[in-house]
């Protein structure tokens, strides 16, 4: 069974640009959550989706957005990139709300 | 608002030692307490998890001890090996949510 797949693995963007990251959950999982990991702030929750609906959003500015498609794949978008957005962005999928969350390898975003 | 406090920040033990990592949480509305292991360049991998109806869970060399009244839980690694050198994160999950709230992480080094 394939794990959570995140693409691309690495990205370098310039300040002011926008970026879209993709996450394919484990087959059969309908929930996808996104996290930002930085050395200073640790692992911080961005948002969670279930059946194409955003159920919860973390304390991030509106430049961070996401969506989930009918096949449970998810994308997150960051607009008007800032240097501080440089981070490892992680996606996790779950079968149900009482089940384990499995993480992908992450997308390493560097903003220059 | 830091809902999960993890300690220590770093830990060095000799091979065969028993490192112990502690987490304390502030809210009683959590129903799931996982530990994740993360190697450099990888996403967090679920190690072991516990629910509040039990006080201890053991899987292989890894044990979670859970104290509901004290709002604390800890990870013990028996017979630690150099391959266990990684960063460990505790997390809590509110009931009816996919969101994980992570501790700040503990960097473990197991010396040969």
Image (tube, coloured by chain):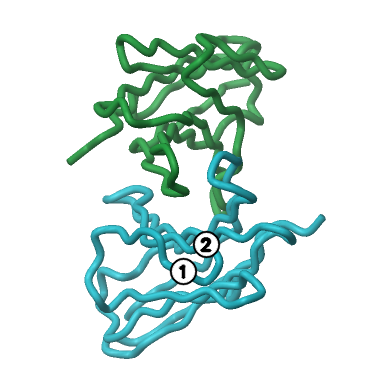
Chain colours: A cyan, B green
Q: Does B71 appear above or below A41? A: above
Q: Position of residue B83 (x, y in %)?
A: 66, 31
Q: Within the image, what quadrant is residue B18 found in? A: top right
> Is B48 in front, or is B10?
B48
The subunit letter for the residue under badge 2 reads A
Q: Are marks 1 and 2 on the same chain?
A: yes
Residue occupying image coordinates x 44% and y 62% = A88
**Which residue sits furthest bottom?**
A17
Residue occupying image coordinates x 51% and y 32% = B34
Q: Position of residue A55 (x, y in %)?
A: 40, 60
A9 horizontally vs B67: left or right: right
A41 horizontally vs A53: left or right: left
Residue occupying image coordinates x 54% and y 62% = A106
Q: What residue sits right under mark 2 in the picture?
A: A50
Q: What residue sits right under mark 1 in the picture?
A: A53
Q: Within the image, what quadrant is residue B101 found in? A: top left
| Kind of element beneath mark 2 | strand
């Amino acid at each position: 069974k394939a794990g959570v797949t995140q693409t691309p693995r690495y990205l370098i963007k310039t300040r002011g640009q926008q970026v879209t990251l993709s996450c394919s959950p484990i087959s059969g999982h309908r929930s996808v959550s996104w996290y930002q990991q930085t050395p200073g702030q640790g692992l911080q929750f961005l948002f969670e989706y279930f059946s194409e609906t955003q159920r919860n959003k973390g304390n991030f500015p509106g430049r961070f957005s996401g969506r989930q498609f009918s096949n449970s794949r998810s994308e997150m978008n960051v607009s008007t990139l800032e240097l501080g957005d440089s981070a490892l962005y992680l996606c996790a999928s779950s079968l149900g709300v009482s089940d384990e969350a499995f993480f992908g390898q992450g997308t390493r975003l560097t903003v220059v | 608002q830091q809902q999960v406090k993890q300690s220590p920040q770093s830990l060095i033990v000799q091979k065969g030692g028993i490192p112990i990592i502690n987490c304390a949480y502030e809210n009683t509305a959590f129903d799931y307490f996982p530990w994740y292991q993360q190697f450099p360049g990888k996403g967090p991998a679920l190690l072991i998890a516990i629910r509040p109806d039990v006080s201890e869970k053991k899987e292989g060399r890894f044990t979670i001890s859970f104290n509901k009244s004290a709002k604390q839980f800890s990870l013990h690694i028996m017979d630690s090996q150099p391959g266990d050198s990684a960063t460990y994160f505790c997390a809590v999950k509110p009931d009816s949510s996919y969101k994980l709230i992570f501790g700040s992480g503990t960097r473990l080094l197991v010396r040969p």
